[in-house]
Amino acid sequence: MKKIKNANIYIFWVLSAFCLLVVPSACLEKEDGCRDVDATNFAANAEEDCEDCCTYPSIFFEIDHAAGDTSLRYGDTIIFEDKLINILAVSFYINGLSLTGADQTITVTDQITLTDRDGNENMTIDDIAIISRDIASFSYEIGSFRGSGDYVELNFQQGLTAIQEATNPASVPSTHPLAPSNGLFDLPDSTFVFTQISLVDLLNEDTLEYNIKNPVNINLPYTVTIDRGFNLTIPIKVDYLKWIEGINFADSADITQQTIVANLSNAISIRE
């Protein structure tokens, strides 16, 4: 029995020396981490995949509210044609963002379950943002994405999809763009307003508000190279001179809103 014990001790020391001197990595616990090269926390030295630890880059809109070539500040008067206007507030939804390349497309990968006003649940992409002419907010996170490469076109919709529009605003978190605290849920009609504009016609001393429920598709040439694992900030210009071009305040609100909707595709561009 004594010889067997000594033999076991000898084998133990041989295996220990083997682990320490020959293949130490095989005898130690493997290090885990994110091994997805599209993630912001990609760990090149990780030997095992971690569980739900990968984080992915986000797409941001950086908005410049402008009148022609001049950034628009609060209190600025817009002079055009024979009109003097002060824009008090603007808010609008965007969704459906995509970047298109020669043979690939990037979209937001975040998802959310939305409950409609009849209590039905629908899984959909969570790429909704609400853009406001807010003195404290010029950068807006649209959502996470995976991908890299060269792209030539930016597409999104100003407005909401049918699923998003049917959402019960009380069912989403208070920080979500569809929450009632954002003020774009029209309680009398129980519907969302896609675009809201409030302005003052200074010549006639009238305060006017337009609640628009028309979706508009925006397609912009945008040449960009996206590196793996890095956020993308897209510089967007909203030109209010182009947006309110041709407005006649003597027209009905419906006609004015039609003009605003028709001008929108020319009023939004990539900022140079």
Image (spheres, helix red, strand yellow):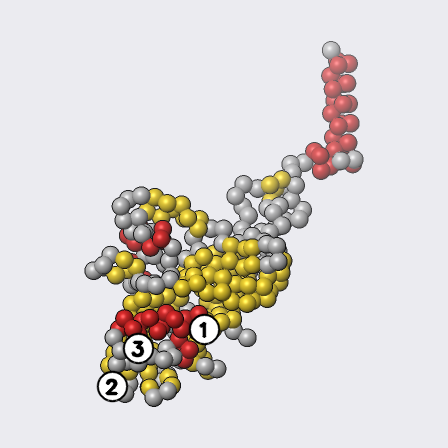
Asked if residue 72 shows in the view, the reply is: no
Q: Nearer the viewer, residue 63 or 196?
A: 196
Amino acid type assigned to the residue bearing label 3 in the image: Leu
x 36%, y 51%: residue: 163
Q: Is residue 57 above or below residue 65?
A: above
Q: Which residue is identified by label 3? A: 199
Q: CA distance from mark 1 to mark 3?
A: 20 Å
Q: Quadrant of residue 119?
A: top left
Q: Is residue 113 left or right of residue 109?
A: left
Q: Nearer the viewer, residue 32 or 213?
A: 213
Q: Which residue is identified by label 2? A: 204
Query: Which mark identifies residue 223?
Result: none
x 41%, y 71%: residue: 264
Q: Nearer the viewer, residue 33 or 61?
A: 61
x 43%, y 52%: residue: 126
Q: Is residue 54 left or right of residue 251?
A: right
Q: CA distance from mark 2 to mark 3?
A: 12 Å
Q: Nearer the viewer, mark 1 or mark 3?
A: 1
Amino acid type assigned to the residue bearing label 1 in the image: Asn
Q: Earlier in the sequence, mark 2 or mark 3?
A: 3
Q: Nearer the viewer, mark 1 or mark 2?
A: 1
Image coords of residue 80 (percent x, y): 38, 86
Q: Which residue is identified by label 1? A: 266
Image coords of residue 176 (percent x, y): 37, 56
Amino acid type assigned to the residue bearing label 2 in the image: Asn
Assess disc 3: are there few (<14), some (14-19) or many (≥20) residues with their C-alpha within 10 Å of its C-alpha: some
